[in-house]
């Protein structure tokens, strides 16, 4: 619910509406705008988009802070499930969606870049110059592009002493005539905040505080020094989105100012900041600084006078504003009845062709040491043992069936012994492709794990895997060619992998490769060149990732232990040049996904084609932590398998990447707290 000081309640939810264009003759046309692939895809599918200004890159921060902040702000928007559209002008062309390379160009060429409000577009475009768009300029382009919301740090306003200089930012007049909602941390603190609010009232612009407090924020500070209250207060992003929707439905040709306070841990003291601002204003006066140069000058001086604290605060508030803007954009899309459709694109996987999982089935013995420190000197440790059924392929197959991907088959071998019979029973009727051997024992694995459930090392008796031969694969060719996805672990021979990949290529079946072990990580690339046409997914851990990177000629990092996320991200993104989707399991750090798409997109379109854009992106998803589970982790042995199964189950239900990974992480968390690699409890995550 939102509260308006004049005391009326706007009518509730509305239906779809189009972007508003209040000019009968605009200074630019759609043909003069260059859209990035991501923005075009988002517009086509009705996904939420957040416009971002570029003056913060060209005039708001020094290099490399401007470059790094711009990228971080875009990533913040993506993590919330929206699409960032940094608006800029390059060589006289307006860009809605600016690439990393183009952002870097703008970051390094500030002296040759024009600060662009509405009045500056004709000059910059006709002279083919570069321009950083202000709030005013960004609103103008966003409205033309049909983007109803933008994020910035703080808007311009009425300058101090405006009664003498008449210096009033074009941002305010733009808010009075362009229907775009601006999410910010209030008015830049160097300005006259009370006069700015009076001006906005005259322009008919709703000024809204979003969050728990009704205080009007003061950019670097959580609230103004004289504790100004906002005219309108809403508690959350949903209510803010309703305000935008209603105003656009009414076709009011004004913007909305949505203010979000800087997080308190980054907030500066209002009184101390005021001293720095007064000093900066005096220096500006002495140096004759005025007009469009005054704001960059004052921001730089305040940064110097606060020993960099204001720059730190500026970075924090713009990231926070971007996060809230993305949340509001999502809620607005729901109100428009667009967002649900974006995530309900028909999936070719859904329900028709279940997967086949090929690889190992193992009888596991787990020896867990209860003591915190272990020395390999022959001493005896207190511990416990347990036995269970495992194997990467077997675990994934069982987990998929538990998660609702009914009919998932396992192609594997077991011995004609008690462990083999137990494994077959665990498949619950999906064992018709499992070969029972009279000449070999079921594969066995003994793992030594510490008291945190982490595996120290394992001992394997895996001779049975050699019986997963090309002949067995060919024998089940009819079943394989009917599958929607082949999931292959690294436990089979090169010859068997080659046969599987030949069938996959012949019938255009996508393949998911689970490396299983660092020494098996590259087997699929060594077996055949057919992987280039069929391998869509690979899910290595850190060590397996390095082995794969080495195979592809990617240089080793200097420090291979405790790899920095940035290095992992870089390696993953390089591998996307060859493999469409890289899913890197990082233990307690979560999962990193690299692909040529956003986290808000599906993996496949309705034509069974993997969704790809021109830009390689990666996202880190933190582990799922269930606040209701208080016990310590038990074992990580089945976590990766349950993670993979969860992601695949999500794919089969037509979920987005982010939703698939969330499902996988939940399944992994359940496995982590169980003595069984695939606990029956994961069936509670089943999607109906």
Image (cartoon, rainbow, N blue to C red):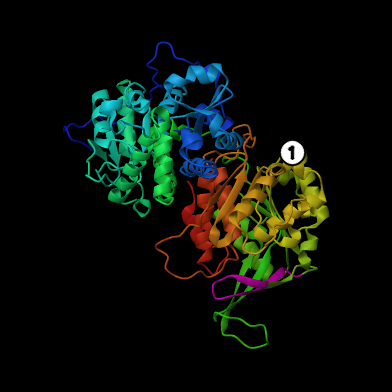
Would you say 260 lies left or right of 578 here? left
Mark 1 burial class by Cα count in 10 Å: few <14, some 14-19, many 20+: some
Where on the picture, by quarter, is residue 508? top right
Q: Position of residue 53 (x, y in %)?
A: 46, 33
Q: Is residue 144 visible?
A: yes
Name the residue that disc number 1 marks.
507
SS state under label 1 = loop
Closer to the camera in the image, 27 or 350: 27
113 in relation to 505, above or below: above
Q: Residue at image x 59%, y 24%? A: 91
Can the viewer see residue 474 in this picture? no
Query: Which residue occupies the foreground of this view, 434 or 134?
Result: 134
Seen from the viewer's position, the closer of residues 183 and 543 is 183
Q: Is residue 449 magenta?
A: yes
Q: Looking at the image, which residue is at 34% across and 39% down?
A: 282
Image point (49%, 56%), residue name: 666
Image quadrant in which the N terminus is located: top left
Looking at the image, residue 148 sits to the left or right of residue 641; the answer is left
Q: Residue furthest front?
A: 286
For residue 299, what is the image quadrant? Answer: top left
Q: Position of residue 215 (x, y in %)?
A: 25, 43
Residue 531 to residue 376: above or below: above
Residue 507 lies within the magenta run: no
- Residue 232 position, x and y percent, is 24, 36
Furthest toward the bottom, the residue is: 379
Residue 94 vs 333, above or below: the answer is above
Which residue is found at the position 75% from the left and 59% from the top?
A: 520
Q: Judge from the rendering whether residue 529 lies leftward or rightward of residue 225; answer left or right.
A: right
Relative to 624, say whether 574 is above or below. Answer: above
Q: Nearer the viewer, residue 52 or 170?
A: 170
Q: Which residue range is magenta in the image? A: 441-457
């Amino acid at each position: 619910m939102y509260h308006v000081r004049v005391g009326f309640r706007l009518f509730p939810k509305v239906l779809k509406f189009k972007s508003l264009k209040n000019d009968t003759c605009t200074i630019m046309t759609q043909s003069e705008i260059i859209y990035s692939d991501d923005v075009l895809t988002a517009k086509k599918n009705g996904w939420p988009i957040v416009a971002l200004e570029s003056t913060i890159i060209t005039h708001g921060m020094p290099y490399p802070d401007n470059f790094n902040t711009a990228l971080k702000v875009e990533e913040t928007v993506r993590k919330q499930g929206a699409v960032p559209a940094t608006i800029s002008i390059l060589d006289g062309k307006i860009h809605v969606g600016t690439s990393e390379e183009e952002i870097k160009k703008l970051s390094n060429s500030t002296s040759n870049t024009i600060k662009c409000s509405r009045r500056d577009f004709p000059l910059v475009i006709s002279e083919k110059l570069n321009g950083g768009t202000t709030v005013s300029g960004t609103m103008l382009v966003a409205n033309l592009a049909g983007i109803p919301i933008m994020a910035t740090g703080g808007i311009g306003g009425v300058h101090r002493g405006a009664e003498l200089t008449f210096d009033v930012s074009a941002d305010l007049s733009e808010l009075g005539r362009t229907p775009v909602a601006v999410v910010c941390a209030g008015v830049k603190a160097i300005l006259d905040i009370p006069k700015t609010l009076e001006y906005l009232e005259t322009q008919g612009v709703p000024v809204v505080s979003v969050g728990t407090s009704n205080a009007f924020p003061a950019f670097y500070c959580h609230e103004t020094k004289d504790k100004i209250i906002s005219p309108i207060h809403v508690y959350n992003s949903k209510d803010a989105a309703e305000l935008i929707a209603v105003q656009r439905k009414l076709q009011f040709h004004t913007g909305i100012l949505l203010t979000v306070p800087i997080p308190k841990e980054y907030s500066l003291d209002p009184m101390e900041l005021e001293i720095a601002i007064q000093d900066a204003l005096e220096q500006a006066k002495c140096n004759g600084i005025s007009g469009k140069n005054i704001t960059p000058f004052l921001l730089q001086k305040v940064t110097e006078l606060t020993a960099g604290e204001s720059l730190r605060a500026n970075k924090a508030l713009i990231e926070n504003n971007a996060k809230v803007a993305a949340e509001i954009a999502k809620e607005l899309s729901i109100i428009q009845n667009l967002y649900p459709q974006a995530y309900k694109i028909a999936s070719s996987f859904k329900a028709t062709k279940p997967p086949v999982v090929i690889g190992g089935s193992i009888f596991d013995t787990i020896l867990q040491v209860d003591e915190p420190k272990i020395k390999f000197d022959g001493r005896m440790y207190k511990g416990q043992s347990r036995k269970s059924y495992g194997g990467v392929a077997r675990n994934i197959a069982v987990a998929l069936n538990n998660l609702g991907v009914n009919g998932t088959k396992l192609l594997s071998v077991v011995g004609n012994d008690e462990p083999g019979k137990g494994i077959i029973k665990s498949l619950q009727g999906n064992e018709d492709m499992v070969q029972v051997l009279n000449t070999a024992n079921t594969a066995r694995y003994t793992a030594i794990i510490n008291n945190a459930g982490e595996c120290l090392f394992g001992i394997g008796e895996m001779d049975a895997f050699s019986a997963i031969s090309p002949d067995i694969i060919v024998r089940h060719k009819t079943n394989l060619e009917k599958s929607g996805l082949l999931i292959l672990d690294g436990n089979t021979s090169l010859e068997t992998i080659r046969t599987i990949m030949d069938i996959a290529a012949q019938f255009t079946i996508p393949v998911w490769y689970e490396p299983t072990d660092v020494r098996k990580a590259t087997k699929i690339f060594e077996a055949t060149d057919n992987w280039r046409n069929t391998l869509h997914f690979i899910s290595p851990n850190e060590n397996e990732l390095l082995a794969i990177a080495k195979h592809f000629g990617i240089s080793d990092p200097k420090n291979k232990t405790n790899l920095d996320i940035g290095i992992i991200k870089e390696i993953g993104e390089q591998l996307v040049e060859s493999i469409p989707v890289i899913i890197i399991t990082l233990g307690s750090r979560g999962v990193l996904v690299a692909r040529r798409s956003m986290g808000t997109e599906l993996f496949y379109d309705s034509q069974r084609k993997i969704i790809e854009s021109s830009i390689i992106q990666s996202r880190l998803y933190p582990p799922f932590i269930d606040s209701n589970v208080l016990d310590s982790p038990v074992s990580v042995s089945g976590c990766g398998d349950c993670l993979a199964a969860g992601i695949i189950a999500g794919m089969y239900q037509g979920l987005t990447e982010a939703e698939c990974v969330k499902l996988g992480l939940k399944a992994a968390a359940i496995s982590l707290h169980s003595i069984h690699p695939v606990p029956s409890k994961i069936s509670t995550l089943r999607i109906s």
